Amino acid sequence: MPVAVVVGTQWGDEGKAKVIDLLAAEHDYVVRYQGGHNAGHTVVVGDQRYALQLVPSGVLYEHVTPVIGNGVVVDLPTLFKEIDELEGRGVSCSRLRVSSLAQLIFPWHQSMDAALENLRGDTKIGTTLKGIGPAYADKTLRVGIRAGEVRNAESFARRIRERAIEANQQLVAVGGEVVDVDAVVDRFAALGRRLLPHLCDTVNLLHDALDTGKRVLLEGAQATFLDVDHGTYPYVTSSNPTAGGASTGSGLGPRLIDRVIGIAKAYTTRVGAGPFPTELMGELGDAIVDIGHEYGTVTGRRRRPGWLDLVMLRHAVRLNSLSEIALTKLDVLDTFDTVKVCTAYRVGGRLLSGYPDDVTTLGEATPEYEEIPGWKTELRKCRNYDQLPEGARRVVELVEQHIGVPVTIIGVGPERDDCVVR
């Protein structure tokens, strides 16, 4: 079956865009299946750097049809800003298709996001304030507005006005900033007209493509441990980035999927609050952040760094039915005297048999490490596995030994071609 899924296996920022860009060369459709503009994907091609939020990474290939699937929440101002920037750099977005079933984000969602985060006080989740959670909440409450509603301009404007008035009443109740109803109606009516050429029944589009022998790549935003069901709740996103979400968010059933590629950094990072057993403080953590440029593509926030955690990765293999791993940014560790990899957790002296299902236990977990002598040499010129120094190969072998699936792609630098494919 010619459908592959790419999913993050940590807390996001694993370098999914580079792997997706690499895989897109052999696919005809690249589909974003969940999340919104709270996710940032960065692709480096030569001296050009592309920071993407909503447009699927495959847009950089002329033969690829990029698709925003039904599971995504779409902020139209961000989408068209991104399209304009890409078009201004010579990247055509005319092929982009947006699901008519995708939910739209409006300014009241962002106001509500900020108000609710403010009410949490010291227990803030660390949301990006992009309105993602409130938009998904409206979807679940069945009061959201779908992209397909722009086809009827009069009805679309009426729906926006009604929802804006209702949302303002709710915002007053939580001390949030109300929206200018007329301004929102006018702005989104114009954006809706602009969306029309991209709007599509993407479910039938993708099934028809498969029927004619085309290949489809499904890309998730965020990652496994930010999944609303399986992540470190409540420090999670509001959708399902795991591989199961790929079927729901694209309309392609699970029996069509034959390859699930998990993306993992050779170390770990997370943004915002939540437990983090292998977190590194001080100079060592600062070095990873500086060398790896670990700042959010969307928010610019400094990421929290830590050693690679194979307890997490084993659990990600189970949750996603991973067929393989792409291990990215191994080169960030080039200068370290010693590289550590977490192979187990202990809580109160007891060795855990698996990844804990609650954040309290996770917060109490003490990691057990295997130490690997650093290779102290530049990996970037390596293009086959045998060229990697012994220490780097040991990291790869340790991953495979503990998680039970092969590492098929190894990232050794930031650019498109800086990788070892096995």
Image (tube, rainbow, N blue to C red):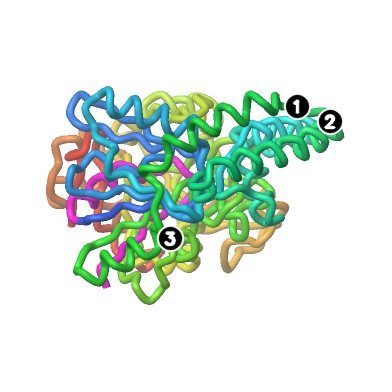
As rendered, which of 323 and 174 lies closer to the eye? 174
Q: CA distance from mark 2 to mark 3?
A: 36 Å
Residue 183 vs 386, above or below: the answer is: above
What residue would you read off at disc 2?
Answer: 172
What residue is pinned by disc 3? 250
Q: Which residues are magenta?
A: 1-26
Query: Decide: marks 2, 3 in contact (CB < 8 A)?
Result: no
Amino acid type at circle 1 is Val
- Residue type (three-letter) at the residue carrying disc 3: Ser
| Residues at circles 1 and 2 in contact by the CB criterion of under 8 Å | yes
* Cα–Cα span, label 1 and label 2: 7 Å
Q: Earlier in the sequence, mark 2 or mark 3?
A: 2
Give the mark nearest the N terminus, 3 or 1.
Answer: 1
> How far across and down, in percent of the image, does residue 170 sit?
81, 38
Mark 2 crowd level (few <14, some 14–19, many ≥20, 10 Å Cα)? few
Q: CA distance from mark 3 to mark 1?
A: 34 Å
**Residue for point 67% across, 59% down:** 349
Instruction: Report x, y in % for residue 387.
Output: 13, 46
The secondary element bearing badge 3 is classed as helix
User: Mark 1 — residue?
Assistant: 178
What is the quadrant of residue 382 in the picture? top left
Neighbour tally class for label 3: few under 14, some 14-19, many 20 plus, Cα within 10 Å: many
Q: Is residue 322 magenta?
A: no
